[in-house]
Amino acid sequence: MPRLTPDQAAKVQAAETDIRRIIGRNAREIRLAAGAHLEQVSRVAKRHGLSWSTGRVGDLESGRVEAKVETLLSLALTLGEIRGEPVTLPDLLRCDGAVLVNGREVADVTEVFRGKPVTESAGQREHDELNSGDPLQLAQASTSIADRRAAKSLGVDLDRLVVAAVELWGHNLSAERDRRADGETNTAARGNITRDLMAELRQHLEL
């Protein structure tokens, strides 16, 4: 499957926020503004159908509770009672930027709960557009010095190396290295990954 280069991925994912974290952050802000403790939220929540311990309230505020509609409605009633004025769903979903929902970025979620149509974010559309092209073309367009060095080391031209990489991983060597590194910046560790990739390419090319 085509993948974004690291720079493209960083640009697309910059605004991503998990919806559960947004709800948790906003719920915590409402609780703290009301001067309430977790135990108080737990006690009031039980009256509104949420059998939550203080630990479960903490899980919610940390973004570890599934954002079901019925949960949000009961949470809004709970927090509304605690702060002494109604809490709306837009209050719980307030955020700047796109929200990650089931792996897709949705734009203006706060406004969605005020009646605005549900649309995907510009970043999601860019992601889809970038990934809709031919994998080989994408891989060729995003080669780096790592790909060129690998081609030279293996004694093949760059085009042949990229074709082999796409056959193996769906993208070029540098993209696969970054995927396996998963944020690792240690030079030695990244070098070991590159050597493993070159061994796989050598076998695939029957060199």
Image (tube, helix red, strand yellow):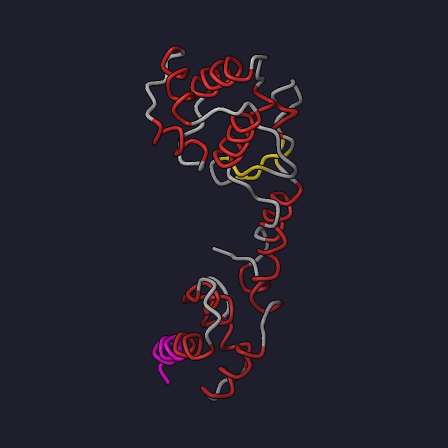
- The answer to which quarter of the image holds residue 6 is bottom right
In the rendered image, residue 11, in percent from the top left (x then y), is placed at: 63, 54
Q: Quadrant of the C terminus?
A: bottom left
Rendered residue at 63%/31% (across/down): 119
Q: Main secondary structure of the magenta part?
A: helix
Outermost residue, top side:
47
Q: Within the magenta stretch, is there residue 201?
A: yes
Q: Nearer the viewer, residue 109 or 44?
A: 44
Rendered residue at 50%/83% (across/down): 151
Number of numbered tags placed on the structure image: 0
175, above or below 73, in the image:
below
35, above or below 20, in the image:
above
Q: Within the magenta stretch, is there residue 116?
A: no
Q: Nearer the viewer, residue 44 or 197?
A: 44
Rendered residue at 49%/77% (across/down): 161
In the rendered image, residue 184, in percent from the top left (x then y), is placed at: 45, 67
119, above or below 158, in the image:
above
Rendered residue at 41%/27% (across/down): 38
Query: What is the magenta range?
Result: 195-207
Q: Residue 49 vs residue 17: left or right? A: left
In the rendered image, residue 108, in percent from the top left (x then y), is placed at: 65, 31
133, above or below 66, in the image:
below
Outermost residue, front side:
35
- The answer to which quarter of the image holds residue 97 is top right
In the rendered image, residue 183, in percent from the top left (x then y), is placed at: 47, 63
Q: Nearer the viewer, residue 154 or 192?
A: 192
